[in-house]
Amino acid sequence: MRKETLLAIAADLRAGRAVELSADDFPCFSAEAAEADKRTSPEALARISAALTAEDACVFERAARAIDEHDLAWIGFKVVEDADAAVANVDNEVTKKYGDVGSADGRDLVFFCNDAKEAVAAREYSARDFFQMKDVTRGPSMHNDQFDGLTWTSVALFDPVKVWLLGASDVAVETAVLARHVGFVVEVVDDDASFLNEERFPDAKRTLIGSFDELAGMKADPEDYVCVVTRGHMHDPEGCVWASKQGVHYVGMMGCKGKNSRVHDLCLDAGMTEEQWEAVKRPIGLKFGAKTPAELAISIVAELVDVRYKQRYSQEARDKHDNGLW
């Protein structure tokens, strides 16, 4: 999401000009999203766009400021299918009580919400609405199927974390699928086109290099994660050295203790310090007996999710979240 796009939408609304929100900017209304829930279709986004007024400009302005502030924040949408059902829905005996009414009204709504539970919208919303507004920031909403007549969806105002998979191994194939499914952007690097191809990695960026020595000319960002999963472990030293020089947030490497000892020596010979070596998570992934490529991918991606959670939230925030679940 670009700040300039949000500010342009707000300016048009305040000037009384019609706006047309794009599924390119709000992919929660893409054709792909509609396959999972027909209520979140491009047609629904067109309907919401047509109903926006100058009063809604505050939502897009607050969203633009959140991007400047690097806030964990979202633009969300209440998408109404049946107005009467949306208003009539109330909490049942199992769920926590959020009031004696359902949605505040039977109209679509665009809103801003951040992880600090600040919400901005052009109209009043009910306690039930506020619960759903907060809930949808988990993306996708965990309670969408609980109430009839409406659904909720959102788009994040912060960039997804990028995961580098160094090596087009079978483990990398499985990891790429799972990592993308939980919201990471994936780039796979290898030196063999017979392994690094669209059939094995249809939804990841693929970077074919002549040799792993060419990693030295590539650039990663400090927020990126690197998984060293080269085929047969043959290029693990080059992967670890490159990731350490890039100063990425997380580096993990597969392998048994005996192999890692040899990689350790090769990495130090290539210029890594002992401190940098100790910062490499090895073996990569959460430990629960994973053996096959698919099982190892589950282990790896589970660890990536945990790392991302701890990167985004302070210990105080994590404790507050955990206590709130009970």
Image: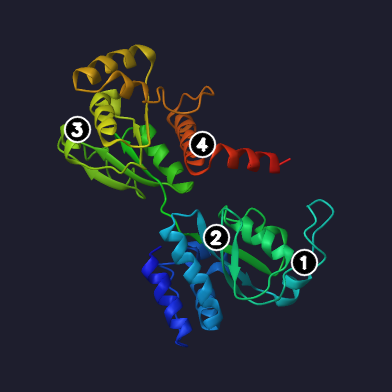
Is there CB contact under 8 Å for labels 4 and 1? Answer: no
Q: Position of residue 186 (x, y in %)?
A: 36, 45
In this view of the protein, which residue sits in the foreground, 182 or 104?
104
Q: CA distance from mark 1 to mark 3?
A: 58 Å
Disc 1: which residue = 89
Quarter of the picture holding the C terminus: top right
Q: Amino acid at mark 4?
A: Asp
Task: Measuring from the top left, give residue 262's x and y in whole percent.
Answer: 28, 14
Give the mark toward the camera: 4 or 1.
Answer: 4
What number is the disc on residue 36? 2
The CA span between labels 2 and 4 is 26 Å
Residue at mark 3: 212
Sequence-first tag of 3 and 2 = 2
Mark 3 lies on a secondary structure that is helix
Residue 306: mark in rendering? 4
Residue at image position (61%, 56%) is 117
Label 3 vs 4, first from the N-terminus = 3
Labelled pair 2, 4 in contact (Cβ < 8 Å): no
Q: Horizontally, is 250 left or right of 232 in the view?
A: right
Which kind of residue does numbered mark 2 sit on?
Answer: Ala
- Depicted 94 relative to depicted 128: above or below: above
Please tell me which residue is depicted at 44% across the width and 69% down the height of the picture: 23
